[in-house]
Image (spheres, grey):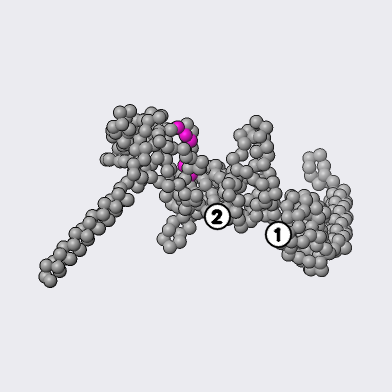
Amino acid sequence: MVMKVLKMVLITLVLCSISVLSLSCASKSESAPQNQVVTVQRGDLTVDITASGNLALSLKEDLAFEMAGTVEEVLVEEGESVEKGQVLAKLDTSEWDNELTKLELALLDAEINLENAELALEQAEEDTSTSITGDIASKTTDPKEIDILELKVKLAEARLEDAQEALDEAKKASPEVVAPFDGFITTVNVEGGDDILKGTVAVTLADPNKFEADILVSETDILQIKLGGNASVQVDAMQGMSLPAKVTHISPTATIQSGVVNYKVKVEVQSLETVMQERQQGQGGQQQQMPAMIPADFQLREGLTITVSIIVEQKTGVLLIPNGAITSQKGQSYVQVILPTGATEQRAIQTGISNWQYTEVTSGLSEGEKVVVLQGTTTTPTTQQPAGGIRIPGMGGFGQ
């Protein structure tokens, strides 16, 4: 009985040892990194800073009444498209006519007062004569009275000037609110019958072709961004759409949230109309064709989620290798090169710009040579980078 038990225990231990050995071998086989061999190629390298944001209309204008009065009629509704020069709202002109009449009468009164003052001064000066030596020969008017009359003339001249300016200003002001550019009405603030003051905003007009976006850039990346720098905007709702943009503002002050320091950067998006025109020119051979296919009926809208990529550096036709092929020792970069014999050698290289996936090689490698990349260190491209991340659009093609 004891022998049978010992045999069973021995068999169990053997089986367990075999199982553990098998699992250990399988685990090592699965976890062992697979070396990847890539060929050194020439390509275009773009380093950009990427962040998400939302589209906003960049050209909005509050259109106000230039005078006080009573609103006679509002001729537009919210969301309505209008053309430059179109009347949007107007005041009751009877009040404006009465005001002009009052100002014209005030101007006439000022002209009469000036004429009377000048006439009185002339009469006073005629009653006083002087000799050749400058002495007063005959005197019937007090010199002080003449001084007073001269002051009255100057005062009458000033009042006439004020009356003329008031009338001119009133004539420049219009009882109508007119669209200064083509666009659409975003808000209407008044209605017929409202008594309003000068400067009351009647409607808000926006240009549907001008958009901008604000993004937050980290303190480590903000120094790379320059005013007027090129950028691109990808609309999340339309995969593959990319619109050119420009950096138009960099906030001088930081936005700090939970101890994280960011800076607000504004980009202005090129209009769809301009992009379509450039694409048509490209199809005619005058310019390169736009890479993004934009549907003819697509319309940008305020609030759309977008991904902004601000280009900080670009190079074309440079030698490129994946970042995973590079190791560093004491500040020197190295790669493992596959020789024609099949052997590998460690070689020192000099590098240039780099993004999240590829690095420029300035010396140490030649086009067509093969280098080793460990599978565990290869960066896998993603469809979207987080705020402040860096990517290389349209890059690929490395292989054995």
- Where is residue 83? Give x, y as percent: 78, 51
> Taking 355 as reference, is 376 left or right?
left
- SS type, badge 2: strand
The circle on residue 53 is: 2
Report x, y in % for residue 101.
88, 59
Residue at the far left in the pictured view: 2
Which quadrant holds residue 21? bottom left
The percent position of residue 242, horizontal first and vertical second, equals 58, 45
Q: Is residue 344 left or right of residue 296?
A: left
Q: Residue at x 35, y 35 (%)?
A: 371
Q: Main secondary structure of the magenta part?
A: strand
Q: Is residue 118 left or right of residue 21?
A: right
Looking at the rendering, in which quadrant would you find the N terminus?
bottom left
Local secondary structure at mark 1? strand
Earlier residue among tags 1 and 2: 2
Q: Nearer the viewer, residue 197 or 284?
A: 284
Residue at point 32%, 51% (across, down):
30
- What range is drawn magenta here? 42-48
| Kind of residue at disc 2 | Gly
The residue labelled by disc 1 is: 186
Crowding at label 2, few (<14), some or many (≥20) Cα neighbours within 10 Å?
some
Instruction: Report the residue that reaches farthest toward the bottom.
Output: 1
